[in-house]
Every structure is written in C-alpha cells, then in structure tokens.
Amino acid sequence: MQRVIVMAIVGFMTPIAAAAQNATVDREVERHVAEIIELRHQIHQNPELGNREFETARLVAEHLEKLGFEVQTGVAHTGVVAMLRGGRPGPVVAVRADMDALPVTEDTPFAFKSVVRTMYLDQEVGVSHACGHDIHTSVQLGVATVLAAMRDEIPGTVKFIFQPAEEGPPPGEEGGADLMVAEGVLENPRPIAIFGLHTLAEMELGILGYTEGPALAAVDHFRIKVKGQQSHGAHPHLGVDPIVMAAQAITALQTIRSRNLNPLEPSVITVGIVRGGTRFNIIPDEVYLEGTVRTYNPDVRDAVERRMGEILAGVTAAGGGTYELDYERGTPATINDIALTRQMVPTLERVVGSEKVEVLDPTMGGEDFAYYANEIPGFFFRLGMVAPGTTSGGHHTPNFQADDASIPIGMRAMANLVLDFLEMHAEHAIN
C-alpha cells in the first residue's frame, strides 16, 4: 500500500509563538482536567470488552457532540470518529485512542475500581481496564476539549478516532484498527499523519518515551490440536498419548528461537493454553495448545510458521499421532515513521523537558495502531503512569493501576503535538 510521505518541516513556529501556544494549552488543560479525570473514573468503573463498548462509545460521542464536533458513531461496530475543523486552512491530522477493556478481575485500591463481570468464551470473568485504555480515551477527550477552545487558531482539521477492540475482537468477529481502516476511517478527509499514545506500567509519572522506527512487534496467534488414541492410564501401550506428544512439542517449539533463527532477530514463541484430559487415570485422545508468536522481520515470521509445522509433524509422527495447526497472522509490527518521529520529539521535549523524554527499546508487545501507520505516517509514544512511592502491576494484570495525574500530562503532550504538526504543515492545506 502506497504511503503518504510527510513533507519536510516548513514554517516552524518561532520560540515566542510556541511558548504562547503552549501557555494556552496549559491554561485549557488546567480548566478542564477535573472534568476529564471524572470521565476517566466513569470509564474505568464501567469497562467493556472489545466490540461491546456501547456505553463507553455513548459517553465519548455525547462529550464530542457537546464540543460541537462532527461525530460519526457505529464505525467498526462501536467506534466513534469526530472532526474538528480549525478556523485556518491547513492539512488533516488524526489522533487515535482505544476504548476496550480486558477479561481481568481488578485488584487495586482505587475507589472507582471495576466490579463488572460478564461472560467471555463461555466463562464468567471480571472485566477491567488492565492496560490503560481508560487513560487513552480520557486523554483524547481532554485533547478534544482543549483544542475545541482554540478552534479559531487551528490551521487545518483534526480527526479524532476512538477505536474498539484493540485487544482483538471476540472469536468469529471482525474488529479493531484493521476494520476501522477497511470502513474508511482514514478517508474523507484523509489525514497526512496520525498520533497515538499508550501508558507504560514500567515508566514513572512525568516521563514520556518513544522508539524511532520499529516500536512494537507483529502479533500472531496459533491453535494446535495434538491427536492420539484414548486408553486407560494403567495401559498406555494400548493407546497413543497426546499429552506426551504435546509436552515434547512445547519444549521443541522453543528450539525455533534458540536454534533456527538468527539470535540478533527478536522473536517470542509462547504457549499460553494447554488443555487436555478429563480424569486422572484416562489418557485422552486429544490435547489443545494455544499461544502467540511475536516478530518484527517478515522472513522470521515465515520461518517460525514453517518450523512449527515441521516440528509438530515430526513429534506426532514419532509418537504415532497426528496434529492440526491453525496459524493466524494478526497485527503487523508498529513502525514509527522516522521523519515524523524526528519532527515531533522536540515538541515532547518542550512540553515536559528533554530530561524527561526517554528513547525506549522496541518491545515484543503488539499494538494494532500498526494498521494506521501502514497507511499514513504514524508516531506512537508512551506515557508514564506510576506515581512516586507507588507501584503498578504489569499490563494485563489485576494490579495494573495508572495514576490520574498522567492524564493532564498526556493531554498537554498530545495537544501540542497536534498543534505543532499542523503549524509545520500549514502551507500544505488539503481540506
């Protein structure tokens, strides 16, 4: 897919103009931050899983409509897209936030913690914002509020994208960023760049982080059935044991990373589910395995899939059984546009100070922001969220807790990124 290339920096603001703009953003953040934090509490206390973000989407749309934006709902099931048209001619830039929660039972000291429970994959589960999407949505609502107050000064258009199902849609459904793109979220009008942020559980409050180029890994999903022949546990010679074959396969799959791939090429192969058997003295006829593969290099991705099939074929043939492998290629790697990143890092440094902007190593975590960044230049950065003297569990854990104080920092950073970018490219009006 052909990508729009960000043009060279033009019309950079003078230090005086930048300082004045920064002061206006700071003032508007201060005016509205209490309201935005309250919205965060509502979203956090009422989390919804992917493609089911009905109340979250309603809250988002109502807030944006009050700001006078052009609002479209029902995009990719529950997505919300809103347009802020500035008072001066200029290009279009997009900002994206994700809204979905996770099937994780929250265990935090928050007064507004989630006690929501629902059904997921035929199990009753707790639901919580264990990855910070409530922060992302709140920050973006805050940015929309700040920029609405500066509408007449804005040179161009800001397209706000509130996305469902970043963590993936329910089995058998479509959803997430790829469906948003397929439904035309990057068209009519087409942005020339897109920005996004994500909390980071290992980063202190007040710190912003970024990675130039490859930032987050491609995410693949595999399902395996190892098939044998059922028998009594006392007579294993009369059956074919899929548990033994599955155990051998799990161990052998790790040799792909350690023995088949260049050790300098990042990759991860994780078996996250092992399920088989009904009783202690029965050898079952089948064992189910499920897991994920993370890579950056497309050739490594190909090699992992090929070697998984070869290993499973060999292990099951040796054990007298068979196998089925369903290897699903998911979100591609998230690659920050290098030119755009270098243009925008000075904005982050101006907002929080250069000593508080960190260059981060690529991570094996995945993000479907990649689908946008594959279409137009994208810049995705990380937001520190852990207050001094406190701790947070990692992402996707019951103890994950992002501090409210990260919200105004995120609002200031993102609002200034948008304004600076539009000023830089004001001569390239396409709206």
Image: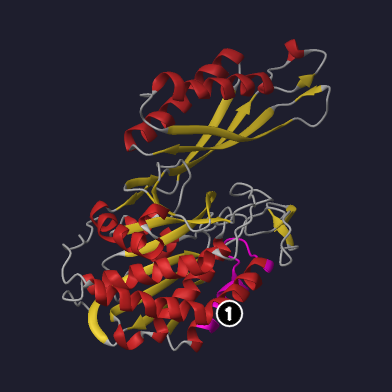
Give the residues drawn in magenta, as a range.
Answer: 45-63
Residue bearing the label numbered 1? 35
Q: Inspect the image, locate mark 1, and give the three-letter code of the amino acid beneath it.
A: Glu
Image quadrant holding the N terminus, namely bottom left
Which residue is at 55% across, 18% downward? 315
Q: Is residue 102 above or below residue 41?
A: above
Can you give x and y, in whole percent of width and height, for residue 90 in the image? 23, 79
Q: Quadrant of residue 128?
A: bottom right
Coloring basis for residues: secondary structure
Can you give x and y, in whole percent of width and height, for residue 306 in the image? 41, 28
Which residue is at 43% across, 49% downward? 331
Which residue is at 69% across, 22% downward? 229
Q: Residue furthest top?
A: 237
Image quadrant holding the C terminus, namely bottom left
Q: Nearer the viewer, residue 408 or 315?
A: 408
Can you give x and y, in whole percent of width and height, for residue 249 in the image? 57, 22
Can you give x and y, in whole percent of width and height, for residue 313 in the image? 50, 21
Q: Can residue 72 be seen by looking at this rendering?
A: no
Q: Nearer the viewer, residue 91 or 319?
A: 91
